Amino acid sequence: MSRRALRRLRGEQRGQEPLGPGALQFVLRDDEDAEEEGPKRGPAGRRPGDAGKEGVRVNNRFELINIEDLEEGPMVNGERSDCLLADVVVTGNKRRSQCGSAETRKDVEVADKAAPPQQFNASCKFRKKKKKQKNKKNSAGETSENGLEDIDRILEKIEDGSGLSRPGPPPLSSKKHVLYVEHRHLNPDTELKRYFGARAVLGEQRPRQRQRVYPKCTWLTTPKSTWPRYTKPGLSMRLLESKKGTSSFAFEHSEEYQQTQHKFLTAVESMEPNNIVVLLQTSPYHVDSLLQLSDACRFQEDQEMARDLVERALYSLECACHPLFSLTSGTCRLDYRRPENRSFYLALYKQMSFLEKRGCPRTALEYCKLILSLEPDEDPLCMLLLVDHLALRARCYEYLIRLFQEWEPHRNLSQLPNFAFSVPLAYFLLSQRADLPEQLSPEREKASLLIQRALAMFPGALMPLLEYCSVRPDPAVASHHFFGPDAEISQPPALSQLVSLYLGRSHFLWKEPATMSWLEENVREVLQAVDAGDPAVAACESRRKVLYQHAPRNIHRHVVLSEIKEAVAALPPDVTTQSVMGFDPLPPLDTIYSYVRPERLSAVSHGNTIALFFRSLLPSYTTEGERTEDGGPGGLNHNQGLNRLMLALRDMMANFHFHDLEAPREDTPEGDGEWD
């Protein structure tokens, strides 16, 4: 601190005598106090506290307060003094209650007179911020908590006196929908900051530019400066209907976007990714082209470019959303039977997969809930086979249990192997938490009961699970007919596919020693029930043979998107033999088309033998009908077609080379050669 600041703090000025101890006094008085104490002056108009040069009155009471004092407040005996705040609150209340009773005003005056004025010695030095952090935390925490409690009590008294009742917070089930999505969890940086800190996540990011390049702020992605400038590609959304608390929407393609879509389908049929790159140069925000090229980059191990293309597709889709379309409410619907809506599903799924691989399971769980909320009844991508895995990875055990309890009566989630094993695992992991000592035994009993039901319903999942976890089973278990090799062989193919999908994705969640010991205990309990002839075991076997005869198409679609080798190998032949496109895997059989792609007219259909001949020689040759379909100028006359044909014939003749058979060959040496 400089000498000038120290002199100002002490109240010294040039040309004045040094101040004595106790000369500097702060008297926080209200205007009413000044008027009431006005007659109480000494002789010559002086107040009893004035003493000439011995006491210097400061007109501006804030002139001598330092910046650190404003932030932390004065220290009295090593503690913060809240008397200033108390005096300000009291005087403020007095001003607001001027029309109150006289008794209340007398009590306030008595309290003000009883409180001694705060005096600070001029030579007193304030401690620095680092030295008083411990005392500051304790005193500030106690003061804030007591202040909040006092405010709550005052509010309760006011409401009781006025006869009003304050409603309490509603329970979680009625407050938020089970598929409600939180905005802050859609950003992966929020989760990464919790793991690694804000400095590690945002350290390399540059500050945002002042100029706003992109027209809209989005929740799903953050626009990057490396992206092309956004222009509306012709994609929009309209509201179809609203009924029973839900709203149905649908994406729409303009005529220009439809032409781009036709070109994209032609590029896909060519099996050449460079054609899609050329198309993106003219239409940088065409969604299907971005998704298809993302798959090509992912197959070439360029994960960063693949993720960037998916984010750009999501940005284009979110910019086209309707103003009433909500990502978080869980009440907006998109019909998967419409081809225009499928791009949004697939873009969200691919982004969710990248987030899971990136180590952001909490963010991936929000994307999974978002996809499931778009059409929860049909569930076109079968997200129910994945939501339990993400909830366990994100340690959202309460959410998984709540979803199971609310949807089990009408969706029969216990008939899916993933829910049958994940829900008891969630109960068990919840019982292992140290902050739930009272609920440990009920949660453990519930987990044991549910895992025994799962083992009785799906006995063929035990031995593959132990093999995945590198655990050698007990000889009594391996040789038993219930859990032996016959259990895995005898289960239906559809059930084998579901079990392979679950184990290939979530087997590592069972590798903990405590989890394995708990599973071993329940396996023995199930074996005892089987040996005792429990009728519940026979009922599970009969139900297993009836339910899992054939898997629906959405499960096959989910297996194709998951790319889990064990599950893909279990797909039926009718799925593996048909072509599967990455931008639209296994489309629904009852697709609702808003526009139809015009059929390409082949040369054979024209019956033009000459055109067919030239096409066989020159693959680049096209007829006028095909050029018109590709978006070129229509109505070409026959002269233009003949000119094109003559140019193609000249190119063909120019490539012909005739060799003179009578001329000696230069490449062979003279004389007779010998064959080795």
Image: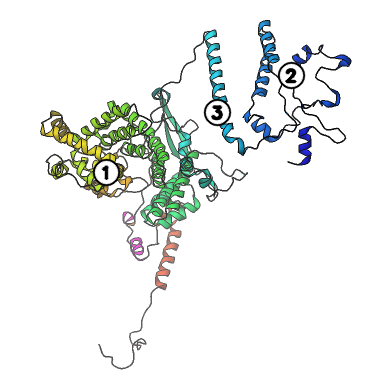
Point out the image quarter for the C terminus: bottom left
Please say whether residue 239 is one of the residues in the magenta stretch.
Answer: no
Task: Return the residue found at the far front.
Answer: 21
Marks 3 and 2, the one that precedes in the sequence: 2
Where does residue 316 sit, x and y in percent of width and height?
48, 43
**What amino acid is labelled 3 in the image?**
Gly
Neighbor class of circle 2 (other Cα within 10 Å; few <14, some 14-19, many 20+) is: few
Neighbor class of circle 1 (other Cα within 10 Å; few <14, some 14-19, many 20+) is: many
Left or right, 318 with respect to 86, comes to left
* Whether residue 337 can be seen here: no
Task: Return the residue found at the far right.
Answer: 44
> Distance between the Cα atoms at labels 3 and 2?
29 Å
Which disc number belongs to residue 29?
A: 2
Corner quadrant of residue 424: top left
Which disc number belongs to residue 503?
A: 1
The mark lying in front, picked from 1 and 2, is: 2
Name the residue carrying label 3: 141
Q: Quick one: 62 or 359, which is closer to the camera?
A: 62
The secondary element bearing badge 3 is classed as helix
Write the start and end of the magenta stretch as one range.
604-622
Marks 1 and 3, the one that precedes in the sequence: 3
Q: Quick one: 648 or 90, which is closer to the camera?
A: 90
Left or right, 260 with respect to 491, comes to right
Where does residue 303 sit, x and y in percent of width and height?
42, 52
Residue located 22% across and 45% down the image: 464
